[in-house]
Image (cartoon, rainbow, N blue to C red):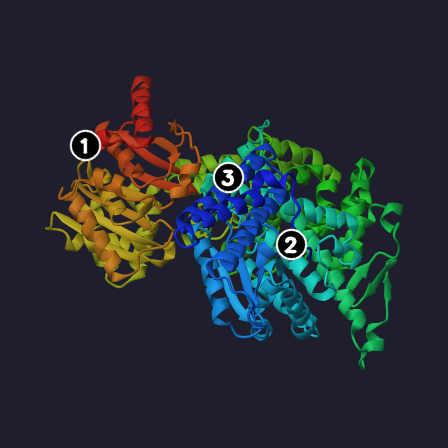
Amino acid sequence: MSSVIRIPSPRTVIDRRDLVERIEALVADRGAAKGRQAIVEALRDALDHGRVEIARRLVEKPSAGHEVAEAQAFLTDQLIRVIHDHVVQHVYPISNRSKGERLTVMAVGGYGRGEMAPHSDVDIAFLTPIKNTPWCEQVIEGMLYFMWDLGLKVGHSSRSLDDMVRMSKSDLTIRTAMLEGRYVWGDQGLYEEARQRFWKDVVSGTERQFVVEKLAEREERHKRMGDSRYVVEPNVKEGKGSLRDLHTLYWIGKYIHQVRDPSELVGAGLLTRKEYLAFRRAENFFWAVRCHLHTITRRAEDRLTFDLQREVAMRMNFADRPGKSAVERFMQMFFLQAKVVGNLTAVFLAQLDEQFAKKQPRGLLAGFRAKTRTVKGYKVFGGRIQAPSEDWFAQDPVRMIEIFVLADREGYEIHPETMRLISRDAGLIKDKVRRDKRANELFMDLLTSRNNPEMVLRWFNEAGVFGRFVTEFGRVNAQMQFDMYHHYTVDEHTIRAIGLLSKIEKGELGQDHPLAHDIVHKVRSRRALYASVLLHDIAKGRGGDHSVLGAEIALKLCPRFGLDEEETELVSWLVRQHLLLAATAFKRDLADGKTISDFVEVVQSLDRLRQLTLLTIVDIRAVGPGTWNSWKRQLIGELYSASEERLRLGHAEFGREKRVAAKKAAVAALAPGNDALIGQVGDKFVDAYWIAEPEEIIAKNLAQLETAENTPLSIATEYYPARGATLATVIASDHPGLFYRIAGGIHLAGGNIIDARIHTTRTGRAVDNFLVQDPLGRPFQEATQLERLRTSIENALANRIQILPQLVAKPDARPRADAFEVRPRVLFDNKASNRFTVVEVNARDRPALLNRLAYVLFESRLMVHSAHIATYGERAADTFYVTDLLGEKLTSTSRLKTLERKLLEATSELTGDEVAA
């Protein structure tokens, strides 16, 4: 690699001649030792001036990643040269050096490549011919002190040539750093000797081993970083599809073919000219993003976190468009570049594989391996399927779908050269192909494959065919949603959901999803189910309700895919209603008969219920790690069972007495003493309680109520594995402020309430059941945690603590939520329940929220009968079933308006005044 970095107008970044003259003058005037501080100041002025100029260039050309990264490396080079010459000539001068008193300064790692972000570490290697002489040690130390005084973060090593060879052989990281070695200053002959020894003694004969180790290292890094190119807070340097992946390709090319520049990968046959240009474009974009991140944070920050995404988007001149904000457009560009890197990596590695295969000595099986078969006109060799000619896809573009179907059916990989051809020819997929009956049949074969649709659809997407054939899918390619709930881009989320459905169908997720496992083979149309998963988010980023717009797209696409009228109508309905089941299960009281009858009225048939349940489960699970849990499984299961019963038996209000009697029998059957408990204290509960609570909780409540007969307050906390949560039951004399105080106590103990059922016995005692998790969705299980929860509730009820000031002082479990704006909304629904007014509050989630809302309801003289808490990343949806003190619904418009205003005030950030009040 050339040791000289060439940049435009270098002297405006740093004028080395002028800096040297200033230092010479200071030495002449004061001497090297006394003038040291002034020399450091002169160097610092040059560094600051250079950084300002580079930052100005970044503002002027916000996408010029390479230019800025190279200017930064150039600035560092010049400073190191000046420091080296000053130390050698003025600080430790010697007149005639021995052979051992030679020193060369090499840039290694990223700096060696001649690219640096504004706050990157300065990685340098000091090389000497033999073990360090005292003079070499003095010079190295002298240089380092100057660099440290400038505030540079230096990663350095000092080695003899023999050490360099020995350590490079034994350590992959050192070997990679030396591979990037570039001469900066010092003894040029020594650098040349080091370079030759590195290639002869370290590299020669270890090419295959280096590739294997580098790829293993890459796999490990990907796992650490989330193993997807489409995580919504990506790492620009280390993430999948990032700079490091591009560098890995370059390192491998350099190690095997000794290329000095990425452009030489073309001559080495590892990339085509077009692919090299894509490599440069992606690298340039990532460098620009990385330089902006360093400039904004003033540190070496490589994670594109939510709070930085807006800022970088603005600096890189992205603007809002209808349905897509500037930040979403910027992130879409980011993910499209990451996708390019993924494609380049695939063809590069496969090409490499071919090159190695050609060098393989032929063994016993060589003749057998070498036989090429023909399958439907395609060549198949070594488990790979290949197009027989350059113009194969141009002759018939439908083949670009057919080849993926064959690969899926027979378990082939697609040859990299053929993937290149497909990417090149994808533009030939026009309307005629999209309307072609055979093409659509092949596409449906792919989508509903019983093998591995997720893997093949991902190839199909990465080759650029998916978005061309289904242009609506092309629009959500790399489309991110700017929130903390969704972990992946829309296309990645959709492909993952299809993969999950396929696994459920194959019986692989029976333990995780017993309900889905049970019903998946009972649906009437597999094709409709898979099509609904494909299309459920197809209208994201268009502005408007994506469910409504998506339902319209489904009506247009399904007939094209070959679905009949009934299937088309079903898919459109599923897309339109794909959020209904989750919203009902998580935000409504499933013990309220009206909830079930309203839901069933929309669903109308058992088949639709099954289809919608499966779509909901894979949709939630594919959002990202941690979004699916046993609590959600339980709620969806409850809603499914109640709805299925209603659909099979018709109107299910078939006698409250029968339902209460059935529940009592179920409780009695759980344990021998339960029958007696029902006789002793069961009559204290009204019918609504028996219908609302599951039998195992009723059994616990009865036992607790009996022992608490003569005590004013009883608090029980225990881990409740069936719900993946902790059950906290409070039995106390009923009074209106009870709920908000208990909620405050639970929050102060570090708990999040995910569900609350509030009951009053016939004797006026409150029996309140709360399901609690920690902020990361895990139950409290340890004895100390359960005790802390109990004590905290007790203290809150006894008024021993000021709840609100302590809640406000608690740090937010998710501080990055500040990057999002969540507009608070209050919805009232008097039709959702026959007995209660349903109040739903959507707001930004924070520790004091539920307590504040409950306090407003208490102040407004309302009784809370049940509360249902759902969180979606930074957004909380808290639903309360309430009545006035006389047990009536709220119907007065003025009262509802006042309540809305007070609830909205409670959702806003709390000020010191409010806390004091």
- Please give the name of the residue rendered at 50% of the width and 39% of the height, measured from the top-left corner: 49
Can you give x and y, in whole percent of width and height, for residue 188 in the image?
64, 62
Q: How many marks?
A: 3
Going by the image, does 692 lie left or right of 184? left
State the residue lying farthest toward the bottom. Answer: 364
The answer for how far apart the CA atoms under marks 3 and 1 are is: 50 Å
Q: Earlier in the sequence, mark 1 or mark 2?
A: 2
Q: Earlier in the sequence, mark 2 or mark 3?
A: 3
Circle 2: is it few (<14), some (14-19), or many (20+) Cα within 10 Å?
many
Circle 3: is it few (<14), some (14-19), or many (20+) Cα within 10 Å?
some
Secondary element at tag 1: helix
Note whether 221 is above or below 67 in the view shown. Answer: below
Q: Is residue 649 visible?
A: no
The answer for how far apart the CA atoms under marks 1 and 2 are is: 56 Å
For residue 766, which quarter of the picture?
A: top left
Secondary element at tag 2: helix
Q: Three-letter amino acid code at disc 3? A: His
User: 510 or 389, which lies in front?
Assistant: 389
Q: Three-letter amino acid code at disc 2? A: Leu
Q: Earlier in the sequence, mark 3 or mark 1?
A: 3
Residue that mark 2 sits on: 246
Q: Three-letter amino acid code at disc 1? A: Ala
Can you give x and y, in whole percent of width and height, for residue 915 in the image?
22, 33
| Pointer 2 with pointer 3, Cβ within 8 A | no
Q: Which mark is residue 49?
A: 3
- Please give the name of the residue rendered at 70% of the width and 57% of the height, measured from the top-left corner: 346
Going by the image, does 146 lie left or right of 95? left
Residue that mark 1 sits on: 916
- Please give the name of the residue rendered at 18% of the width and 44% of the height, measured from the top-left corner: 796
Circle 1: is it few (<14), some (14-19), or many (20+) Cα within 10 Å?
few
Q: Name the mark nearer the viewer: 3 or 1.
A: 3
Can you give x and y, in whole percent of width and height, for residue 260 in the image?
71, 58
